[in-house]
Image: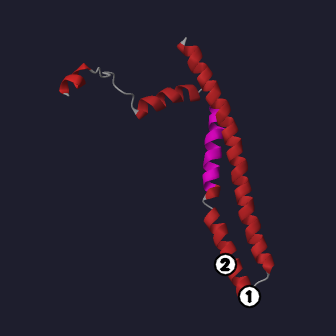
């Protein structure tokens, strides 16, 4: 079995580190600072809004409990549900926006890589 393994060629090249890959990508991202800023801002805004989902969900549960006990009107639950639905709608719109920007950025970067490679 060792004879078979000795016949197999191994790739002697060193692999690129994460730092080298990010440095390479940043070289292309620097050409599009506005789009890159929009992309990063969209992702961060989406994350911040997603962190609010438990808060809105808890408000809906509390409202449902109060309605079940007869301590509140259904308007409280409707308001909590509207807040939760609005949160999901904003997340959806932000994701659609930054993904559309990402598609443009990715296609431009690929085009530049091909152009620079040849």
Q: Residue at x 25, y 19 (%)?
A: 7
What span is in magenta?
32-48
Residue tagged by mark 1?
Answer: 71
Q: Is residue 32 visible?
A: no
Q: Residue at x 61, y 55 (%)?
A: 48
Question: Which SS type dominates the magenta stretch?
Answer: helix
Q: Residue at x 71, y 88 (%)?
A: 69
Q: Nearer the N terminus, badge 2 or badge 1?
A: 2
Q: Quadrant of residue 17?
A: top left
Q: Is residue 41 magenta?
A: yes
Q: Is residue 116 magenta?
A: no
Residue farthest toward the left in the current orientation of the protein: 2
Q: Residue at x 64, y 50 (%)?
A: 45
Q: Give the percent coordinates (x, y) of residue 27.
A: 53, 26
Mark 2 and mark 1: span between their CA atoms? 11 Å
Q: Secondary structure at mark 1?
A: loop
Q: Quadrant of residue 2?
A: top left
Q: Residues within 10 Å of mark 1 (few under 14, many from 20)?
A: few
Q: Secondary structure at mark 2?
A: helix
Q: Is residue 98 left or right of residue 15?
A: right
State which quarter of the image contains the C terminus: top right
Question: Residue 92: which numbered mark, if any?
Answer: none
Q: Give the percent coordinates (x, y) of residue 67.
A: 74, 83
Q: Nearer the viewer, residue 41 or 62?
A: 62
Q: Give the percent coordinates (x, y) of residue 88.
A: 70, 57
Residue tagged by mark 2?
Answer: 62
């Amino acid at each position: 079995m060792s004879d078979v393994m000795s016949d197999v060629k191994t790739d002697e090249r060193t692999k690129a580190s994460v730092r080298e890959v990010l440095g390479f990508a940043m070289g292309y991202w620097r050409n599009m600072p506005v789009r890159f800023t929009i992309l990063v801002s969209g992702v961060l805004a989406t994350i911040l809004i997603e962190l609010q989902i438990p808060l809105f969900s808890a408000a809906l549960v509390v409202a449902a409990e109060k309605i079940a006990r007869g301590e509140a009107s259904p308007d409280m639950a409707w308001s909590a549900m509207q807040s939760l639905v609005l949160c999901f709608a904003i997340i959806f719109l932000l994701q659609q926006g930054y993904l559309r920007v990402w598609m443009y950025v990715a296609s431009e970067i690929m085009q530049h890589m091909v152009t620079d490679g040849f």
